[in-house]
Amino acid sequence: MNKAVTTTSLALALSAALAVAAIPMTAHAAEKDKCFGVALKGKNDCKAGAGTSCAGTSKVDYQSNAWSMVPKGTCEQTTSPTSPTGFGQLQEFKAKSA
Amino acid sequence: MNQPLSDTPFMGDAASAASPVLPSRAGIGLKPEHFRDVLAQTPELGFFEVHAENYMVAGGPFHYYLEKIRARYPLSIHGVGLSIGGQGPLDEDHLARLAALLERYQPESFSEHLAWSSHAGRFFNDLLPLPYTAQSLAHVCAHIDHVQERLGRRMLLENPATYVQFAASTMAENEFISQVVCRTGCGLLLDVNNVHVASVNHGGNAHDYILGLPLHAVAEIHLAGFAEATDSIGQPLLIDSHGAPVAQAVWALYAFTLGLTGPKPTLIERDNAIPELAVLLHEARQADAIMERLFKDSVPGTESQKAPA
Amino acid sequence: MSDHDDFAATLLSDTGDCPPGLRAWNGSDPAQRFAVYRNNVTVSLIDALADTYPVTQAMLGEEFFRAMARLYVRAEPPRSPVLAWYGDSFPDFVQGFPPASGLPYLADLARLEMRYVQAYHAADASALPMADLAGLLADANALAHVRFSLHPALETVRSRYAVVSLWIAHQGQTPANSLGEINLDLGEAALLIRQGLEVEIVRIEAGAAQFIDCLRSGASFADAVHSAAPFDLSNALALLIRGGAITHFTLQE
């Protein structure tokens, strides 16, 4: 905890912050630590999905013991120091029989 | 929730005699993907239409762009979540959000669907069908009366694209719609693609369907593309996908409709596989060209833009 | 009146059933036609989740993500017709989803993505002029008791895992290039701040995130600093001021 906070230190910090904020940011300052996200789309519309064979109708139900899938995305490129396999202990999930 | 039918249909025309209407020209659906292009190009276009629910957020880019675009173009606000065909009472919170949105943007038109999308507190995000019976007619009319009173304006009701029919139905869809228009004074948003889709899906005749509608009430037309599937015996089942250009058969049906109604504000709808803005503008120009060919003497855009008295 | 009860219940079931009372003009099986509606509902809601959680989807791959999202849609269909916020409980679902337990950071990553959506659509507000803030320097004692109001679009995230780095690595052209260098078990915090029309995510110290959360809950300047773990106060303030995130203040008598 910041037990040493004094009213003077608050004023000093604000004063320093104002000085920093008043200066235009350089192009690459702290580039690694910040990032703009993408523009969002609208989620409400009145379209219908095309046909009846889309992903949504495929039979998937892990509660009935049918779920055996492994993530196959960018998680495979990560490394975890605590994982013996190197990338996050991925294994096929087998639901317990009900 | 049966409310008594109103004895006095909402007097939309009288109440809004001096309010502006959409021009009888082609417009397109406004997609966030095109916000910047629209502002940069300010294309020649009759109007933009937005889905009301997408703008039921407090602030940020959606409102920033819609305000700028609305300042330059006529606007239609098209609801997709009011569930007018629902069996329970209308969602008053949702009506309040709609009222606030209409107050903020003062659109030339507000429309919703002859369908339901919410039931028992769940929202299904699809336009679901209802049986056409005396009971459902009373129910839909009560809902539309309530909407028009709550929003203080006339609404347009859109005919649906459907994939099934109900054994319980006692009247045809166009007959049902005629009754609704007659009893509530609402206008009709005639989706010509939906007419084509429903006619194919239910073995009907699209021309007869249109001839059986209250065409005097048509205040806007929708055009869109569909996808093709088949039913269990291999006959065509069309899906209202909004993901393709307007089909030739629908353009023909559009021209047939215009011959009966005169020029009307016409929306090109695309919600799936959204192309470049230029592609949609090109389709809008096709609709304008049909109107110009059919009504050479009247300049599109001036036809229904009556000057306020 | 139970027509819609049957129809609605069958929409969210996994059987090939069809609600009673449907027919087709040509005698074809109404169940196959009804399946169009069931498909629309499921696919459109999974699409809505995929829009909100693109990085979560990228990490898992589309197939796994959509299969998981489908179970969520069945379990928790929307309660509101406004879909912008649909899936706000999805991170909790992910956290309790056994097949994803090998990726313990996933739920926090999803939380970060939902906060992004919230920041994107939050109310607009004007930043306090810097001169007004500078005016506070005149009285150091009063400054300690000032309560700052922050921009409605401001959000913070704190995680035991490196979810901010994961998120940043997925923006831009080559998402996965730097993934191998991220130490997943290193906790991170972030500030989401909307400037103009864009939401920026900035990695910050955990203490700074605590400080900002305290300010948001109405604590005074001094109390917020006191209750946070050690952090660079002037850095945090500069970030808030530069981002236009301080919108108002009140002086305590």
Image: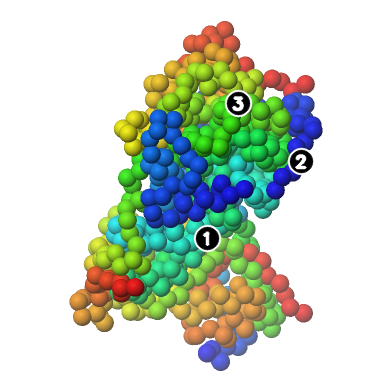
Residue indicated by mark 1 = C118
Alpha carbons under labels 2 and 3: distance apart: 21 Å
| Rendered location of residue C106, percent (x, y) | 37, 70
Residue located 49% across and 81% down the image: C207
- SS state under label 3: helix
Colour pattern of the rendering: rainbow
Classify 10 Å Cα crowding around label 1: few (below 14), some (14-19), many (20 and above): many
Residue indicated by mark 2 = B4
Classify 10 Å Cα crowding around label 2: few (below 14), some (14-19), many (20 and above): few
| Rendered location of residue B158, percent (x, y) | 57, 32
Disc number at residue B175? 3
Residue located 64% across and 19% down the image: B216
Residue located 76% across and 40% down the image: B4
Name which residue type carries label 2.
Pro
Location of residue C8 with respect to B267 vertically, above or below = below
Q: Nearer the viewer, residue C63 or C170?
A: C63
Using the image, name the chain to which the residue with label 2 belongs: B
Location of residue B89 with respect to B306 vertically, above or below = below
Name which residue type carries label 3.
Glu
Labels 2 and 3 positioned on one and the same chain: yes
Alpha carbons under labels 2 and 1: distance apart: 41 Å
Using the image, name the chain to which the residue with label 1 belongs: C
Q: Nearer the viewer, mark 3 or mark 1?
A: 3
Alpha carbons under labels 3 and 1: distance apart: 44 Å
